Amino acid sequence: MITISEKKLQEAGALGIDEFLQVFIDAYLEALDGNLTADNMHLLNGNQHSLLAYYFLREEVMQGGFVQLIQNGYGGYVFDNPTAKALKQFGATDTAKIVYKAKDIFDFNREELERETTEEEFMAMYVDFEQFDELEEMFFEIEEEQTAIIAQYVDENIAKFGEVAK
């Protein structure tokens, strides 16, 4: 079980939702020695994996879109797992819809999207996969609100995301 410091949670919660969620993400990444692998996936439960997948989705899409998410190796983690379903259960239905649509594009073009690329080829993918553009714009518009919904769900169901220790 992942243990979360009550003091850290309270301090982070006072700073905002991003900081609150980051306490969980930091604990998960620490338990995984900073690297998610097939050998350590069992250390997190389904809700923890879903929150971590949202973290990767949010970080990568906000910085470089779905192409970057996939090229950095998180496509399978986000799209091959029930991330969208979990986000829906968390109340982030608009983000779940975007993930379902992005998954369709990913599944249809997986081999091309996941292949090793040069920097030039990587940049060209943004033109080749313009179908992600609209989804990214939608994500940018709702990200803050959806993150707040997820943070509220985590706060109301904290035991599903970690054991709080004094």
Image (spheres, grey):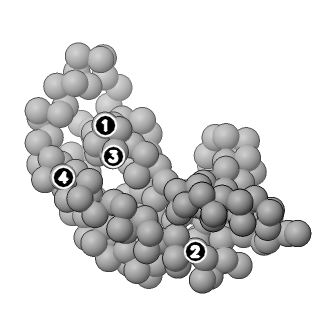
Q: Quadrant of residue 160?
A: bottom right
Q: Specify which label sits upstream in the sequence, 1 or 2.
A: 1
For the residues labelled 3 and 1, the Cα–Cα distance comes to 5 Å
Screen quadrant of the C terminus: bottom right
Q: Specify which label sits upstream in the sequence, 2 or 3.
A: 3
Q: Is residue 121 above or below residue 17?
A: above
Q: Which mark is residue 137?
A: 4
Q: Position of residue 15 (x, y in %)?
A: 60, 58
Q: Say whether marks 1 and 2 touch (CB < 8 Å).
A: no
Q: Say whether marks 3 and 1 touch (CB < 8 Å).
A: yes
For the residues labelled 2 and 3, the Cα–Cα distance comes to 22 Å
Q: Specify which label sits upstream in the sequence, 2 or 4.
A: 4
Q: In the image, 39: left or right of 109? A: right
The one nearer the camera, 63 or 40, is 63
Screen quadrant of the N terminus: bottom right
Q: Which residue is mark 2?
A: 154
Name the residue rendered at 28%, 42% in the picture: 65
Q: Which residue is mark 1?
A: 64
Q: Say whether marks 4 and 1 touch (CB < 8 Å).
A: no
Secondary structure found at label 1:
helix
Q: Position of residue 103 (x, y in %)?
A: 28, 59
Q: Specify which label sits upstream in the sequence, 4 or 1.
A: 1
- For the residue marked with disc 1, what is the amino acid? Gly
Secondary structure found at label 4:
helix
Q: Position of residue 83 (x, y in %)?
A: 43, 66
Q: Which residue is mark 3?
A: 61
